[in-house]
Each structure stands twice: as structure tokens, then as C-alpha cells.
Image (tube, grey):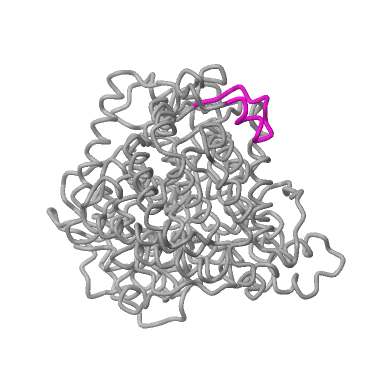
Amino acid sequence: MRRSPVVFLLPLLGACAAAAPAPTPVPPVTTAPPTPTIPPPPSMPLAQTGIDPTWMDPAVDPCQDFFAYACGGFVKNTVIPGDRATWGTTESIQKQNEELLRGVLESATSSPGDDPLLRKIGDYYASCVDEATIDRAGAAPIKPLLDRIARVKDDKTLAAAVIELHANGVFPLFDISPQQDFKDATQMIAGLDQNGLGLPDRDYYLKDDGNMKDVRDFYTAHVGRMLALSGMKPAEVKQATVDVMRIEGKLAKISQDKVTRRDPYKVYHRVDRGGLPAIARTFPWDAYFQGLGFPGIQAISVNEPAYFTGVDALMKDEKMAAWRHYLAWTVVRTEARHLSKPFLDESFAMKQKLTGQKEIEPRWKRCVRSVDGALGELLAQPYVAAKFAGDSRERARKLVDAIVEAMRADLAALPWMDDATREAALAKLGKLHHDKVGYPDKWRTYDFDVSRSDFAGNAMAAIRFELRRQLGKVGKPVDRTLWDMTPPTVNAEYDPSMNEIVLPAGELQPPFFSRDFYPAVNIGDEGANTIGHEITHGFDDEGSQFDGDGNLRDWWTQGTKAKFDEATKCVQDQYSQYEAVPGVHLNGALTSGENIADIGGVKLGYAALLAWEQTHPEERRSVEGFSDEQLYFLAYAQGWCSKETPQFLEMLARTNPHSPPRWRVNGPMADVPAFAQAFRCAAGAPLNPGRVCSVW
């Protein structure tokens, strides 16, 4: 993904600020003067190109720290809002989107007219912002699930409780979802995967590095406070907390780590229905699929057979009282966001510990996101009409086409790739699906009732509906028309099994992209940061293991694969030297795919820029002494202008496959010689190191 998929991230600042004193540009590389017959290009203020001069810090040497040069003004002048742990370009767009959607929802709440679409989203939103009714309900919405757990007394009732929770979208121990068969990407199968931890990653249970022990200790007390809110008696809370931490600790020990899970061969084990008893012999699998409402599911992969064997043994080892405590905790932490203020406040206290966010977001913001999650393609329709009308879709598709052609030229000229592998790579690129731009051609329907006075009931109904919709795909051919992201989402993705990129309308907004931006700026941000990045994912350390049809298959010759692995190791070693906060280094293996995609995206975008310069000379402008190449790199960097809390940065480094924004700028710049040329960086400067790491 272009943007981090962390739940506390996502979103952006409006287009460009009003014209301000422009930073002194670094002299571009001297080129031959134009022939006298060609008039000089018309001038254009920097602030009108899509670059924001006020975000820059001209006192910084771009060859030393390009992030600080492009974003230093932004960092100095930005105060992270109290309800955020990070604030930057992405967050600014999200803010704009949320404010627009708030207006849509408030209008739908007060005067939906005869429009059933508006009435449904309006009633859902009305139930969410009705804090008085939600607070009166307290823990009542989860009481039926807690009562079911209270009846657990033996192996049979334990399994039955797990099944009922899964059917309600609460996933202790493991979870289930549809996935494309890695070996036959035309078919949908069921995927069973590890789950059941309340902390962000298994390492928080197993290591004491940095703030991990402090976070774990806080989490232990947090579990007790939340269980007390749910109605558990004080005498029981202490033992329940011990039980929860012990069981989650055991689950952490048998869970795959983050780096292992980047290897598709290590998370795909096709066992099918008949193979499940061999890896978890006592769990009632027939009853499980019956309880989910899909008794006919047969095609199944598990992420790791040993994990399910371990879970099966653990269900035998622990006492029933401990399981009641663990299951109750899983319900409480999963559903807390739908409950009364005491639950929300305590849930936020845990988030605050992890991220450093100072205050909880206003209710309306959380409710906008709740509607987007539950009824996303209903809410998206007025959003698209307001924010992605006219020729925006067509312009974005033309930019995609330009980046695809740049990748085609890059593959054709790579010196380290032999002809057999090159042919396969070009074939894969030729099969890349890249028509999902902006919004779906057909909108989804939502077949569940919505009450104006029962927020938790609405949310749970939406979760059950989505689970049924997803599991209904299993055993059927892949439907390529479906979207996994809603159009207002500020993100993009590449799916290796689909061999496709997806660009929602929310991503195609200023300051990432605008029909009014100077082309070099659009190419530098949306072209390199998003489109080039996502296309490169098809050829990163993970995506390169899938062929053009989306099947997990080795299409590399041995010699070329060795060179690819060597280049990948160079990138991993480079980024492992960077620190998120003092003393906490990035995990180069975890961030490998995103870093490769960042570097590749910058190179592809730059090639597209050169092609644009040659084919559209009439569109070029003189911009206050900045060359097109400098504007291109500035646009890329300003797409990552942001400021974060130290806690958030540490959590990002430990759990997220994306590098922090500073290194998503400076890392690629050090690996792209064209940057050093554009800004005349001396040999040996930090961003002109001589030895570069590059895969594509």
C-alpha cells in the first residue's frame, strides 16, 4: 500500500497555500540553452504548481536531508492535533473527506426525503451520535455473548462458544476469511489464520525491547479495568487478568512473526476440509462451518498447521474458568468501540499508551468512519459526486498508463535480468489490471436493517452481514469487479493474487493529485508515490513470487533470482541502519517490500517525467528557478510531509511494513542518482553516497 495501513494512520492538507516568499531553489543541472527559435516557457508561481513553499525549509541542504528541505517548514509549524498521533498530508485529506461526509450524513439524518439510501446512512449515523442512548445501554449490547460464554463448562461448550463468537465477527484464537487460492487464482477458498491477541504484535508479549515491557504492563492493568466495566466482580477480575495474559502469551509463542508472514509460501498450506482433523484433531470442524452458516465449505488453506495444532492442544491444557475469562475479554475489547463512554475512555487509554495521542477524536469523526466501514459504498456515492466528478477519472487513468509504460521500458532495459525472466516479467506487466480508479462501476447493496436508536445493534448487524458476504465468495470463481476499499479511502493497493492496482477517489485528491497541478507535480506525487509504488509491488520480494495470472509460482531463472535476492538484501541492510526514534532501528526485512516499491516508484515516475517533457513541450513552465526534475522530487517528498509522536514512531517501527515518512523520502533519494544530479549533490553526500541499492 502507498499509505500505512495502521488503524491510527490514514489521510491531508488542501492543495497549495497562497503564494509566499519562495525558498531559494538549488541551481539545477546546467543544460544547453534552447535554440533561439523556441520561445521561453511561460512563468508560473511555485505556489500554483501543487508545491507548498511554506512547507519547505530552504536553510537545509537537500543533499543532506531532503525530507527536512521539502517538509521542514511543515514540521516546524505543525502542532499535532490532540486527537491524532500523527499529522501530515495523508491526515489532511482524510480531514477534508470526513468534513464533507459529515455534512452528507447530517443532512441524511435530518432530511433524507424519500431516498432509501440517504435514510439508511442517516439512521446509522443518528444511532452512532446518540451518546445518551448508548451510555444508558452500558454493557447490555454484549450481554448475550457474555451470557453464552458463562455457560462454558467443558470442551464441547468451549468449542460451541468459540463458534458462536466467530459467527458474530468476534475472533478468539483464529479467524476465517475468503482468499484467492495461491495456486489457482481463479478460485476463492477459505483462509484460516492466527488471531486472538489484544496487543499489536506477538513481540509485545515476548520481548522487553524499548517500551514493550511498559506497554505490556499497562495492557495487563487495562484488561482488568475493562473486564470490571463489563460487570465482572472485583474478586474475579484479578484472576481473569492473569488468565488472559497467560493465554495470550501462549498464543504469541506459537504465532508466526511479521517477517515470516511476508513469505507467501509460509502462510499458504492447502489442507481442505478433510485435512483439518489431522492438524487440530479435537476441534469440531463440521459444527464450526455449520455454525457459521456455510456447512458446504471444503476448499481451505491455513496460515500455519503448527499454529492450529498448538491451539488445539491449548484448548485442552487450560481450565474452563480461564477460557471463560479469555473469551469474555475478546468480546469486550472487540466491541468496546460500540459501547458506552467508560468503555471508550478505557479503550482510548490503551491507544494513548501505544501512540501518544493526547485526546480521543470527536464523536462525529468516529461515527463518519463507522458509517464508512458499515455502509461504505452507500456513503461513497455522494462523496464521488462531490469530489471526483468531471474528467478526474480519465486523467488519473492516463497517469496510470504513463507509469505502466515506464515500467515496461525499465523491464526491457534491466541489465541484471536475463531474457527468459524478462519475457515473463513483461508478460506479467501486460496482464496487470489497472482499471479500478476512483469508484466501482456497480455499487454494492447492504441487506440488513438499520435502527435509528441502536448503534451497537447496527454495528453488529453490519459485521455479521459482511462476514456472510465474504464467506459467500468461497467455492466460487473470483469476481474481479468487487472492491475491498471504499472510494473515500485515502490509500491505494496492489493485490498479487489479482495482479491489480486499486486507486480510490479519496487518494486522488490535492495535495496528492489535481487536474489543476503542474504535470511534473502530479507525476512526482501520485505518479511516483502511489501508482509507481503499487506497480512495483508486483515485483517486490513478495509480489515477485506470483505470476501474471496471480498464481504463486517461481517464474525466475536461478541466476536472475540470485541477483534479485542480492539487490533486495542491499535494500534491507540500508534501511536497517535507519532509526525511527533514537535506539529503535527499522526492521529492514519487514519493510523490504515497501522500501523496494518506494525506490521503484521514484524511478518509474522519473522516467514518466522525462517522457512527458519530450512529448508535451508546450505544457512546460518556468517555475521560479526550479527545474521540472526538482519539482518532481519535491512533489514526491511533500507527499510524505508529516509529524508524529515518538510513541507512534516506535510502534510503527515495531509493527508496520512501511518505513516512517522521513525514510520514505531520504531512503529512495539516496538510491536514485537522478536526484543527486537534479540538486547537484557532491559525491559522498548523504543522499549521493555512491553505492546505491536498487531492485527496479
297 is within the stretch colored magenta: yes
Q: Residue farthest to the front?
A: 235
Q: Nearer the viewer, residue 584 or 671?
A: 584
- In this view, the residue in front, 652 or 345, is 345
Q: Quadrant of the C terminus?
A: top left
Q: Is residue 281 above or below residue 355?
A: above
Residue 682 sits inside the magenta stretch: no
Residue pictured at 36% horizontal, 77% vertical: 78
Question: Percent from the top left, x then y, of residue 545?
Answer: 41, 28
Residue range highlighted in magenta = 285-301
For the view shown, which residue lies furthest in the right direction? 114
Q: Is residue 683 left or right of residue 674?
A: left
Measured as percent of width and height from the top left, residue 73 is found at: 32, 76
Residue 456: x %, y % from top left: 64, 60
**Front-most of residues 333 and 584:** 333
Q: Is residue 220 above or below residue 25?
A: above
Q: Is residue 69 above or below residue 657?
A: below
* Residue at figure coordinates x 27%, y 52% from the top left: 667
Judged left or right of residue 574, residue 318 is right
